[in-house]
Each structure stands twice: as C-alpha cells, then as structure tokens.
Amino acid sequence: MKKILSVIAVVVLLCAILTSCTDVAETSATEEGTTKAKTTTTTTTTTMRTTEDLETTFAEVATNHIYPALEKDPDGDYPYEISSYTTYYLTSNETRTQNIQNAVSRLDQLCIPDGATFSFNQTVGKRTVLAGYEEAKIVQGDEFVDGLGGGICQVSSTIFQAALRANLDITMRACHSLEISYVPLGADATVQWNSQDFRFVNDSGCDIRLDVSAYDGNLVCTVFAKEDITPKDLKIDITKSGEVYTLTRTVDGVENYYTDSKYQKPKPTTTAADSTTKQ
C-alpha cells in the first residue's frame, strides 16, 4: 500500500511541475507579445521630434518611407531633351556655392526608371559637416540666419521647375515660409531633412535622366529621356489672389497640377543679399 501511495504522490508532483512550467511559458509569450506591440507603436508614432530641431514635430512614418535606390547612368542613351530650367546664384557667396555644388554632385546624371519615385532627401542625403556642407543663410521663423546646408533649396526648386515642364507627377512639394528670389514666388520647393521632402514620380512611360550642373553662377537642371515624351502645349501659370500664389500646369488645355503658396516677409533688418533659402 505504501508503494502505491508513493507512486501516486510522485505522479501528482510531476503534474504540478508541468502545469507550473506551462503557466510560465504562457506568461512569457504574453509579455513578449506585449513588448513587440509597444515597440511597434513607439516606432510608428507621428509625434517624434527631429534631433536637428527640438521644436519641430513631423509625421515620421510619411517622411521615412524608403524608395528603391536610384543610380547614375552617365553612359546611357537619353537622346531626347524634354525640359530644362535655369536659376542663378552669386558665386561670391562661397559657402552657399559649395553647398549647391555638393548637392548637384549627388544628382547629376541620375537615372529615374519609368514608374520610380525621386526623393530629394533620400538622394542627396542628410546635410552634415562630414558630408561637406557649410553654413549659409537658411530660413528660421521670420528671418534668415546662418545654418548648415544653406542653398540646398535652390537646387530642389530648380529640379521642381524642370520636372513640372517635363509633365512629371509631383507628389510632394512645399513653399518656403519667407519670400525668396531665385524663382518666382509660388515656384519654389523647400526641403528640410526628415521633415519636408520634394518628390515626384516618373510616370512618363520611359526611363529619364536628370542632368544637373552648377557653374559660373548658373544652376541648370535638364530632363532627358529615352523616348520623345515631350508634352504637347504645356503651360505653367502663377496667379495671385490676396496673399496666396497659385501655380497651375496645363497640358493640351487640361489642368493636371496645381499648388498654393503663401509667404511672410522677412524682418526689415534682413538685407537683399541674405535672401537665400531654407537649406
């Protein structure tokens, strides 16, 4: 009888141990699932702050989307010039000129395959000292101040105008907060790392290439294509109503793009020579 009781006791003890282990495993799985869920929520929050400007908030999910990388194609055959746009800068402003040329070096002869998205920030990269950028005038609030990468927005604005004239699909564009002078008001495209990008999609039906140069005060962006995709009867107009500038693009009599812009005037102490750009 004692042996039978001993066997029963051992069986009961083993069942208790197994039940305890199962409870621990289930608890661990629940905790792991909770941790993963919290991590996902944190990394997709829409109110994260950029380390460059602690006063700036932005939609992290929207700005951090990664598009397929674009590659340069200097030897490719792109025989058709579709559009071109030129802006002008002062070569005497050496740091700003350096920033412009630095960005241009990353953009020149860039191939954008049919259907691909061009992201200015993803292509040019973060503007840092290690990347070769220097301080020049940028927009901060209602004034122009010295900041790293000043002049970059002239490059994005020049590309914006060339892309408009090539009848490409502009998917992200914003104006400066202050009036600028290198393009007509309403025709600029500001950029800021990790908070404001400039993007377009190559919906032309064939591969295109951007030829971008900055030399002797001339900043030029030309769009070349493998096929003749020159838009028919393309017109770009900018009208002003009150304080709002509206840019519209029509092709063959049909409007297919418009964007609104509103600007502040810089502080009276700001000189004309300082009127450059936010980045």
Image (spheres, rainbow, N blue to C red):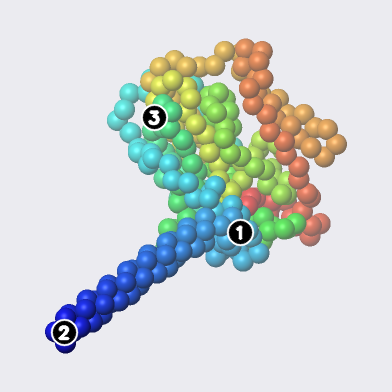
Q: Earlier in the sequence, mark 2 or mark 1?
A: 2
Q: Residue at x 27, y 73 (%)?
A: 15
Kind of residue at badge 3: Pro
In-front residue for pair 75/164: 164
> Is residue 59 at all visible to an observer of this figure?
yes
Front position among marks 2 and 1: 2
Element under disc 1: loop
Front position among marks 3 and 2: 2
Label 1 sits on residue: 47
**Rendering coords of residue 23 (x, y %):** 36, 70
Residue furthest out toward the front: 1
> Is residue 137 at all visible to an observer of this figure?
no
In-front residue for pair 225/145: 225
Specify the quadrant of the image occupied by residue 184.
Answer: top right
Label 2 sits on residue: 1
Q: Earlier in the sequence, mark 3 or mark 2?
A: 2
Front position among marks 3 and 1: 1
**Rendering coords of residue 65 (x, y %):** 48, 46
Image height of 72 relative to 25, above or below: above
Q: Residue at x 20, y 83 (%)?
A: 5
Label 3 sits on residue: 113
Pointer 2: residues within 10 angstroms few (<14), some, or many (20+)? Answer: few
Q: Residue at x 62, y 12 (%)?
A: 252
Quadrant occupied by the N terminus:
bottom left
